[in-house]
Image (spheres, grey):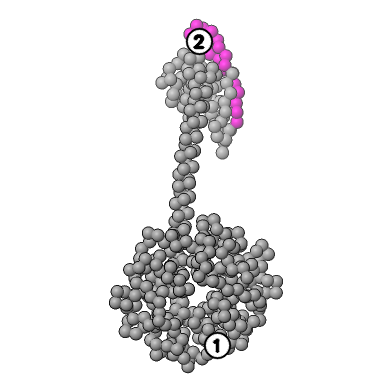
Amino acid sequence: MQTATSDLTAKPANIEQETLLIDIASRNVVSLPLGGSVAQAAKLMADNRISSIVIVDPAGHPAGIVTERSVILALHDGYPAGNSLERVMSGKVVSAPEHITCIEAYQICMRESVRHLVIVNQENQLVGVVSETDFRLHLNLSLLAGRLQVASVMNQLVLTVLADSLLQDSLSLLSTSQESCLVVVEAQCPIGIITERDLVRIYANQADPSRLLVSQIMSHPVQTISQDDSVNVAAEKMLQHKLRHLVVVDKYQRLAGLICEHDLTQAMVSGLINDQQQSERRRMEAEIIRSREDLAVRENAFRTLVENTPDMIARYGRDCCCLYANPALLKTYGLELHSVIGMAPIHSFGASPSSLLFQENIKRVAATGETADFLYHWRNEAGQTLYVNYRMFPEFNAA
């Protein structure tokens, strides 16, 4: 078994677009072997203030994970603390390799709807674990710059209980929802909060929830934030007070909503992904501009070469119509450009056997994608027979 603790007041290096997941992960992972008890898991989580325990097989492979949610369900169902944790652990361990980036890793968390990601090596052995808290602590608060107020990211549907209600009833409410805390209210104003971590301590101490009132275990006074404050203020306050939840109030100090680290982390990662996308878009736009400029330079150099060579050069389409003819060709045949462009050889040079052969070779090269050589001859205005050896190249292969 290994243990590790984290200092929530520390300010580690910020996640950049290429920061690797392993660089922000806890490497001395708190783990238990198969066959351990739920009580052991709950005590480890309570003593180390961590939100999960990885269960490993004898080879060091992740076999399951016990989270705060697992313990809450065990507490609600009255599952004996001394019993095996295999009944309460999640057998589905969402894992990731060491070499992926933090952005890629958090996208896995969002896709799989999990708050913990187990990191494995090439042999599928446990090497680290990362939680949503790790992502939040390493993200740069500047990613929230320009974002809306707390009201824009808070959850307005908050689970609430009264201080004099039984804890068992609150457990029933929490276990049937996906929320991670309950807000204790009095006259619509928040006076306390019960989190998953509070309930893990209850289970670790083997207290009976049917004999406890909410007021006996709730954290109070509750930390609040105005719905008109910025998300940056919320993030700073959570970091300063080592919180994963902040109760949101209106100007009359009435309950307005709840903001948790999940909301903040999603907002910050969305900002980072947006920055990444904008950076990639700018890079691609710059690459396109450079490519176009380079192409223009190459085209100009090629055109200069073609326009001034003594060799005759022409381009023809699949329909045998001329697309380009250089000055040397026009001069040799005594033609004007307008009488050649858009014309087939039989129209430009006359319907002679050589022109027909010329045209047939264009079709054959276009169809086969193979180079062709042939001898073309014609009579000039002085009655002389002239011979030209042509070589035709396909611009694209037959496919």
Q: Is residue 224 magenta?
A: no
Q: Which mark is residue 380?
A: 2
Residue farthest to the right, as pictured: 59
Q: Main secondary structure of the magenta part?
A: strand
The kind of residue tagged 2 is: Asn
Looking at this view, is 202 or 76 the one in front?
A: 202
Name the amino acid, label 1. Asn
Sequence-first disc among 2 and 1:
1
Above or below — where is 35 with respect to 290? below
Task: Magenta stretch: give its range.
Answer: 370-388
- At x 59%, y 85%, the residue is 39
Label 2 Cα neighbours within 10 Å, binned few <14 / some 14-19 / many ≥20 = few
Q: Quote the CA–CA distance across marks 2 and 1.
A: 110 Å
Above or below, 272 against 379 in this view is: below
Drawn side of residue 227 relative to residue 239, left or right: left
Q: Crowdedness of circle 1 by 10 Å Cα count: few (<14), some, many (20+)?
A: some
